[in-house]
Amino acid sequence: MQLRIIFLGTSSAVPTAKRGLTSIAVQRGGELLIFDVGEGMQRNFLKSGLGTNRRMKVFITHMHSDHVLGLLGFMQTLALNGRDMPLYIYGPDILKEYIDVNTRLLNVNLTYDVYFTAVREEGVVVKEKEYTVKACKAEHSINSYAYCIEEHDRPGVFYPEKAMALGVSKGRLWHRLQHGEDVLVDGRLVRSSDVTGPRRRGRRIGISGDTRANKRLEEFFKGCDLLVFDSTFSEDEKDRALETMHSTAREAAELASRAGVKMLVLTHFSARYDDVSKLVKEASILHSNVVAAEDMMVIDVPYPSSDQ
């Protein structure tokens, strides 16, 4: 199952010539999970070729304009491109009012149904057959949530010779065993675990939204394969980071290192940094695998090499 991150916007409060406002798309197979929708993000969305009529969920971390102002434009763009599949939106209670009022005032005619779920507390926000999305309170100037996508464990490697030895003929029963189901063969139960290796863990992707780094988020993001974290400022602007309730690149790296994160992606850069290599350098002192997000950057998240 392909798992891919596409950065549609990587700036903080204001866009720059090279960076749009915050938006991240996670492509998992045929589904898109979009985190925050900064103003104008639909332009990069269309450039990405992700498609406007596919299974899609939108998660909003908090109600600051650089994270939500583009939602109505994005929704209208989907409609103008003929979307007819439902759109699922998750975020603060007030987001529902924001959508309802603005679609009415702006006469936005949608061609699809919208289903809204308020995120009011920590824990599971979405639970699908193959993955779960969880929320954790962030530490920002207003109510804000970080999110984590957790794939469920997969069945172990399938061993055909073991299935044949147990009298299971090749065909649909093999398929069921491969996918973790137990089957009956001539009235005898054959367990999936009898013909597969140890279960293989799923991948984990963390997205911080705007926040100060703290111990709670460290625990929440523990063991992530990839973590996208607020890195608005360099260390010499730490006072500004404290004042605005954001994080420095070094603080993001400290958290990622303690949490055992495999890859750290810095994002949400202040417009004062035309060149963010300084922030990457600061973070790389504390974490061995750090990159700076760029608009339209794509990162594939593979299964562990020993776990294919």
Image (cartoon, helix red, strand yellow):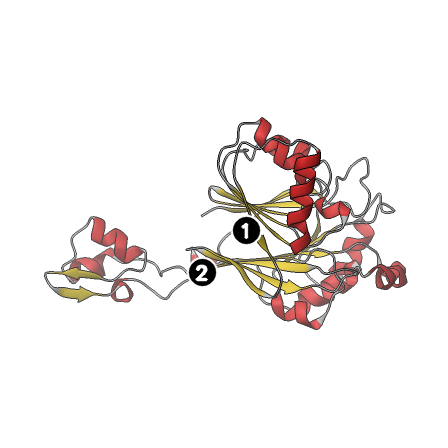
Residue on which disc 1 sits:
301
The 10 Å Cα crowd at callout 1, few under 14, some 14 to 19, many 20 or more, is: some
Residue 150 location (% of width, % of height): 52, 59
Tell me which residue sits at (75%, 42%) in the image: 21
Q: Earlier in the sequence, mark 2 or mark 1?
A: 2
Considering every residue shown, the one lying at the far left of the view is: 186
SS for callout 1: loop
Q: Amino acid at mark 2?
A: His
Label total for image: 2
With respect to residue 110, does 192 lie above or below? below
Residue on which disc 2 sits:
152
Q: Quadrant of residue 10?
A: top right
Residue 44 location (% of width, % of height): 67, 34
Q: Amino acid at mark 1?
A: Val
Q: Quadrant of residue 147?
A: bottom right
Camera-side mark, 2 or 1: 2
Residue 260 location (% of width, % of height): 62, 67
The 10 Å Cα crowd at callout 2, few under 14, some 14 to 19, many 20 or more, is: some
Answer yes or no: is residue 286 visible.
Answer: no
**Which one is nearer the viewer's eye here, 215 or 139?**
139
Tell me which residue sits at (64%, 46%) in the image: 24
Q: Quadrant of residue 14?
A: top right
**Which one is nearer the viewer's eye here, 44 or 82?**
82
**Which one is nearer the viewer's eye here, 209 or 256?**
209
54 left or right of 289?
Answer: left
Q: CA distance from mark 2 to mark 1?
A: 15 Å
281 left or right of 223?
Answer: right
User: Which of the image's four quarters has the C terminus?
Assistant: bottom left
Tell me which residue sits at (84%, 57%) in the image: 234
Tell me which residue sits at (64%, 36%) in the image: 74
Disc 2 vs disc 1: Cβ atoms closer than 8 Å?
A: no
Residue 276 location (% of width, % of height): 80, 48
